[in-house]
Image: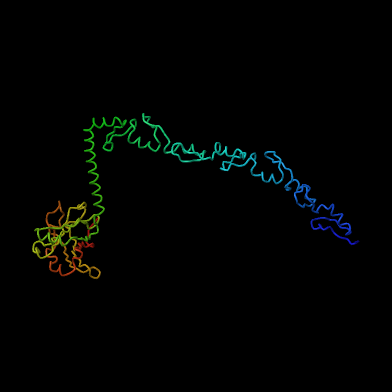
């Protein structure tokens, strides 16, 4: 029994050491030794932690709620926590206000800026802090007529139609405003104005119609100019060949004319023509083709007579490269009247080939395909004189 021993709680920090026979007496006072809670909660607590246990964790301790000042046992306080009606808590609607738990339902129902409120006009729900802003744009909110007429108030969404169709105080322009009438007055006076000024309105419409006709004509000319061919080569596509051939055989002298084309942007203006049933010595047996010079915008700047070679080519369709066919060319004689500067739209045929291609050859070879024929008229570009 004389050997030296350490306290059984030396790992918890007890520094005691002595003879073994004195250990039991030491444990009766060792602050690290566990003893029964004096409140008889059933816990074994080291003496050094007893005060904390009695103050904070013992379920049999007596404690007072810091919010309502009611005394509870430790266990009762834990159950009371989170339920105390006097505890201030943040609003569940996240308005940022702290309210006593017991008044939360009243706050959320009456005071919370985030509570939901129904718009009295459109019945949609908004938070209380945005309802007033919604009121400034609500389509069903009643608003007075801005013209201060006797009608109204109107739902905001109906105000535009009221002003457009009904408001008698709104100043409206005359129905003939676009024609030039300058009247503008209350709607209820418009009908009187129209009745009293029908003659002047008719005159304005006549003037407007004339002006619009001139504008339309100018636009047509602009569109025609944009679509004009300035390349010196016309590729003339003739559709419905069979029907046109039958018509040509039933009517003497039926002539097809091509769209006009130019040798260059500021060059000669030309036009091709075709007699499907022939003309002159080719009548009834051949297709005849001609070209004539038309009056152009820049004739005063060009050299006359027109002396550039012209080639007619009727393409045979379906051949390799699409280059097969019949071609005829000529160079104008400077003495021919057809190629002097034209003073007006010429009545003559111009110059060409009355026996350009025979009907027999036309039927034997593939010049006609899908009831369509292609004729190219090409002016030799090496001899074009243009400014």
Quadrant location of the N terminus in the rendered image: bottom right
Q: In this view, does 107 lie to the left or right of 68?
A: left
Q: Can you say whether 253 is above or below 155 in the image?
A: below
In the depicted structure, whether residue 25 falls above or below residue 328: above
Residue at 15%, 53% (x, y): give it.
Answer: 342
Q: Which residue lies furthest to the right in this view?
A: 2
Query: Left or right of 60: which side holds 115?
Result: left
**Image vertical order of residue 303 relative to residue 106, above or below:** below
In this rendered view, identify the residue nearer to me: 363 or 148: 148
Q: Position of residue 117 (x, y in %)?
A: 50, 39
The residue that appears at 21% across and 69% down in the rendered structure is 324
Which image quadrant for residue 24? bottom right
Q: Which corner quadrant holds the C terminus?
A: bottom left
| Relative image position of residue 262 (x, y in whole percent) | 22, 56
Instruction: Give the x, y percent position of residue 321.
Output: 25, 69
**Which residue occupies the foreground of this view, 233 or 334?**
233
Name the residue furthest top: 150
Residue visible at 60% across and 38% down? 103
Name the image quarter holding residue 337: bottom left
Q: Which of 374 and 35 is in front in this view?
A: 35
**Colour scheme in the image?**
rainbow
**Is residue 294 depicted above or below 171 in this figure?**
below
Is 196 or 183 nearer to us in this picture?
A: 196
Q: Toward which corner of the image does residue 122 lie, by quadrant?
A: top left
Q: How many labels does the image show?
A: 0
Q: Residue 238 at what x, y percent from top left?
A: 19, 60
């Amino acid at each position: 029994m004389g050997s030296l021993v350490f306290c059984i709680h030396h790992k918890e920090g007890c520094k005691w050491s002595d003879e073994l026979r004195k250990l039991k007496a030491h444990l009766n006072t060792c602050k690290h030794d566990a003893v029964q809670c004096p409140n008889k909660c059933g816990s074994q607590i080291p003496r050094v932690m007893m005060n904390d246990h009695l103050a904070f964790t013992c379920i049999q301790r007596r404690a007072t709620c810091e919010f309502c000042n009611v005394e509870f046992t430790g266990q009762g306080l834990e159950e009371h926590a989170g339920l105390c009606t006097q505890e201030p808590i943040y609003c569940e609607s996240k308005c940022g206000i702290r309210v006593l738990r017991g008044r939360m339902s009243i706050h959320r129902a009456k005071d919370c800026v985030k509570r939901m409120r129904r718009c009295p006009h459109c019945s949609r729900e908004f938070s209380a802090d945005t309802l007033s802003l919604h009121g400034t744009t609500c389509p069903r909110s009643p608003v007075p007529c801005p013209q201060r007429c006797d009608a109204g108030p109107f739902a905001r969404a109906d105000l535009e139609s009221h002003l457009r169709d009904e408001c008698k105080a709104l100043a409206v322009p005359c129905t003939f405003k676009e024609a030039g009438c300058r009247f503008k007055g209350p709607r209820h006076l418009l009908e009187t104005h129209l009745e009293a000024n029908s003659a002047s309105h008719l005159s304005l419409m006549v003037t407007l119609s004339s002006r619009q006709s001139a504008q339309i004509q100018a636009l047509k000319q602009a569109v025609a100019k944009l679509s004009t061919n300035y390349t010196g080569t016309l590729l003339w596509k003739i559709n419905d060949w069979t029907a046109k051939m039958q018509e040509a055989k039933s009517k003497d002298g039926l002539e097809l004319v091509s769209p006009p084309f130019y040798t260059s942007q500021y060059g000669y203006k030309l036009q091709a023509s075709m007699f499907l049933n022939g003309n002159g010595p080719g009548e009834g047996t051949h297709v005849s083709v001609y070209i004539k010079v038309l009056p152009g915008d820049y004739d005063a700047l060009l050299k006359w007579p027109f002396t550039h070679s012209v080639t007619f080519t009727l393409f045979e369709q379906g051949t390799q490269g699409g280059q097969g066919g019949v071609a005829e060319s000529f160079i104008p004689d400077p003495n021919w009247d057809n190629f002097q500067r034209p003073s007006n739209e010429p009545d003559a045929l111009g110059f060409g080939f009355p026996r350009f291609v025979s009907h027999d050859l036309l039927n034997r070879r593939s010049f006609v395909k899908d009831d369509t024929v292609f004729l190219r008229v090409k002016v030799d570009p090496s001899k074009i004189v243009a400014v």
